[in-house]
Image (spheres, rainbow, N blue to C red):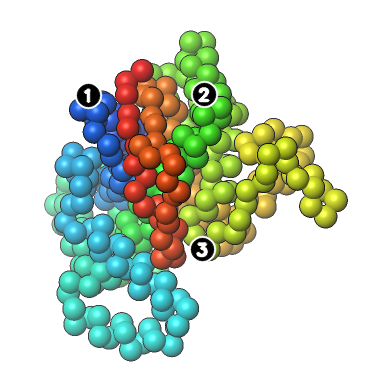
Amino acid sequence: MTCLVQMEPSIGHCVSLLVERFRELAKTGQTFDMRHWMQCYAFDVIGLITLDKRFGFLDAGQDQGGLLPAVDAYFMYATHVGVYHEMHPILIRLLSFLPTSGMIHLQNFAVEQVNHGKALLDAGYRMDDAFLVRLLRMHAQNPEKMSLNDVITYCGENVGAGSHTTSISIAAIMYHLLNAPIVYVTLREEIDLATSQGRISSSISYQEAQKLPYLQACTKEAIRVHPVTGLPMMRVVPKGGMTLCGRYFPKGVERWFDSDERVSLMERNLFSFGAGTRTCIGKNISLIEISKLVPELIRRFDFKLANPEIELKTVNRWFVQQKNVLCRVHLR
């Protein structure tokens, strides 16, 4: 985690850009898709962290270089061959002849970026300690242990998986906050109080965000209710809580304000990022992105769902993606 915290300035830069985009949307009053902007944010962050450059999603407000459809197509493929795995050896050969397929497009993009980064390093160009730079140094020291193909694979996976997971999680947090006005107001009060007391800076740090208990509870509850991967089981506790098999389950965010022992047990059994040796390797990066962005948005803007009466739609292609989280935003 110490190494990842060094990447905070890169994440903070993308937070500032997204804040500017929302200021523009607040002035025009137009409706926007929250999930789309969270994806723009996540793509540019993962670009800086992995390749030492942003992709430009936050500048353009839209896909750049066909990456979004390529990643979506890749996960559609992975979803189906993950179930019908015997089809993979056949389909992968066919797809290799289709340069426009999602998998091949993503692979070609990774090859191009790695080769470009390697050429810059070989020419003596100074680059920050992005993921690519660290991998290329490992490759130079021991090419048998870390081949160039390994570098390409890891960078491609970072871009492919790192953008969707984080954007889905942040969109889930924002959507459920907007659907629970009392929780939304309580979180805002916590953030405003911390700001007035000087406990959080003008650009909120990860460490500062960790000391906001209600923010952390909202984050845990949102990713519990809407985990990024798989088929989510029903996790809604009715008003007043419920007793199941002799154990009482409180409703909503308040479940995370139990005894320290109980909360620790719940956290160990929160599988939103996997568990044990199968824990998502990007978990801590994602949590930093979430912790820096969400409180910044809540303290600077007033968000509302454009159509609160419409139930949220999701598409499960390995990642459970929200569709049309339409919102409006106003400056506070």
Q: Quadrant of residue 3?
A: top left
Q: Which residue is mark 2?
A: 185
Residue, far front: 309
Q: Position of residue 157 (x, y in %)?
A: 36, 62
The amino acid pointed to by label 3 is Gly
Looking at the picture, tell me which residue is in the foreground, 165 or 123.
165
Among the two numbered marks 2 and 1 on one chain, the one whose residue lies closer to the N terminus: 1
Q: Quadrant of residue 140?
A: bottom left
Residues under labels 2 and 3: Cα distance? 31 Å
Comparing labels 3 and 1, the label whose residue is closer to the camera = 1
Q: Position of residue 150 (x, y in %)?
A: 34, 67
Q: Which residue is mark 1?
A: 27
Q: Is residue 6 left or right of residue 21?
A: right
| Crowd tier of the residue under label 2, counting other residues whose Cα lies within 10 Å: few below 14, some 14–19, many 20 or above | some
Residues under labels 3 and 1: Cα distance? 38 Å
Residues under labels 2 and 1: Cα distance? 23 Å
The count of marks equals 3
Comparing labels 2 and 3, the label whose residue is closer to the camera = 2
Among the two numbered marks 2 and 3 on one chain, the one whose residue lies closer to the N terminus: 2
| Crowd tier of the residue under label 3, counting other residues whose Cα lies within 10 Å: few below 14, some 14–19, many 20 or above | some
The amino acid pointed to by label 2 is Val
Residue 64 visible in the displayed image: yes
The kind of secondary structure element at disc 2 is helix
Q: Quadrant of residue 126?
A: top left
Label number found at residue 230? 3
The amino acid pointed to by label 1 is Lys
Q: Residue at x 51, y 63 (%)?
A: 230
The kind of secondary structure element at disc 3 is loop
Residue 131 visible in the displayed image: no
The kind of secondary structure element at disc 1 is helix
Q: Are marks 2 and 1 in contact (CB under 8 Å)?
A: no
